[in-house]
Amino acid sequence: MYLNEEMNCQDTALILAVLLLATSQRMAESCRGPGPRFSTRHPHKTQVALVYRQHIPNMSEKTIGASGPAEGKIRRSDTKFKDLVVTLDQNVVFRNEEGTGADRMMTKRCQDRLKTLALMVVNRWPKVKLRVIEAWDEDGNHGRDSLHYEGRAVDLTTDDRDEEKYGMLARMAVNAGFDWVFYESKHHIHASVIADDEVSMGSGCFPKDSTVTTHDGEVLKMDELKVGDKVLTYDRDTGARKLSDVILMMHENADTVANFVKITARTENGHQSIQRQVTLTKNHLIYKHESTLPDRWHPRAVFAEDIQLGDYVYLNSYEITNSTDFAAAKVTAVHSVEGKGVFAPLTAEGSIIVDGVAASSYAVYHNEYISHALFYPLRLLWRWGFRWSDQPTTTKSISGVHWYPGSIFHIANAMLPRGSLNP
Ligand SMILES: [Zn+2]
């Protein structure tokens, strides 16, 4: 049951307070691939050592989905220099060959990951410590656009310099939450992170070739969709198709290249079997069928990256079966793909049918009900007839994120207990 109609005055006041708070926050960016994900679970952690020259994720370092683009060198005279933190951790040894302390300087996110990794090292090898041989570089010793110039990268060894350990050290760096880890040389591993100002923001998105269906059956691509369009969504309580207004484009940028999860699913009803594919960022929520009985409607919103082979998702089967109910379909393939354009339409219903597959409008936070509640003020304003200005310059950041979702996730990030952020 959704909260919009049942919300009492106190809830409304609380959420309007959040809205007021949000308006004081600055605009934000999103769809940063692994991006922020608020969850208490830690899926898919393995203990397999990386091989020499392997990097995780398997894409280049500065793409969205890994550590993201370089933002420019930080020098001591820059205002951004004050955002770098000095790391004093007794579990970490610093080479500090420059004698300037530069190797102790890095972004906050980089430091958090480093401290986590240092503990993992001590736990695994009790007599060994993590050693940093390079962090922030102010001397221009790295290649052009290196993330070392921004304090977003570290080069790591163990203090016993046992090169046999480095493949496993790289794996541990992945598990510690570094956004890109590279077994770069026989003598060290390189690990980097997303820029701090990208971290606390985010939404999940669909690429621009993804399609939605409007009230009159027209199929529109994401970049043709407009606020006010009535599109096919579905009712999460009944499993039936439902038309709902697009009330906001939370993110729209036709040029951004991002990494997506492509999910293929097929229904199992013989000759009428339908196959569909949906593509979305891995931190976007999609409905997974939570029952062993295929004909029962029992959805749960999960991150796209948590969908596995053999899971069931929901397809719109109307064109073939004439049924307005959605059909549970078995996932037959999951791929990681690069795609162009990032679009995140928010419907009043909170769900959306994309490429014939039932997905949520929400991302980043694992609890869809809370996300839906946080966007209640927008639905209320929509019902009162308020329409967001269509001018990107006033409501959107340069990269195309609407200020409201950007701010909401800023606040959520600040309010959630440490450790609940799980990129
Ligand atoms: Zn490096």
Image (cartoon, rainbow, N blue to C red):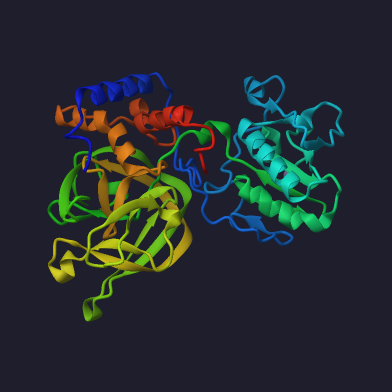
**Which quarter of the rendering shows the N terminus?**
top left
Task: Please tell me in which quadrant of the rendered image residue 4 appears.
Answer: top left
Name the residue: 66% across, 40% down.
116
Q: Is residue 388 visible?
A: no
Report the side of 103 relative to 354 (left or right): right
Q: How many marks?
A: 0
Report the side of 123 relative to 162 (left or right): left
Task: Please tell me in which quadrant of the rendered image residue 153 appears.
Answer: top right
Q: Can residue 40 be seen in this view?
A: yes
Residue 31, given in percent of the width and then of the height, sits at: 44, 43
Residue 141, given in percent of the width and then of the height, sits at: 79, 38
Name the residue: 58% across, 39% down.
194
Q: Which of 92 and 109 is in front in this view?
A: 92
Name the residue: 19% across, 39% down.
228
Residue 196, given in percent of the width and then of the height, sits at: 57, 32
Q: Which of 5 and 314 is in front in this view?
A: 5
Residue 65, given in percent of the width and then of the height, sits at: 52, 49
Report the side of 353 relative to 198 (left or right): left
Task: Please tell me in which quadrant of the rendered image residue 318 appears.
Answer: bottom left
Where does ligand 1 appear, by image quarter? top right
Q: In this picture, is 349 found above or below 165?
A: above
Q: Which of 324 and 65 is in front in this view?
A: 324
Report the side of 118 relative to 362 (left or right): right
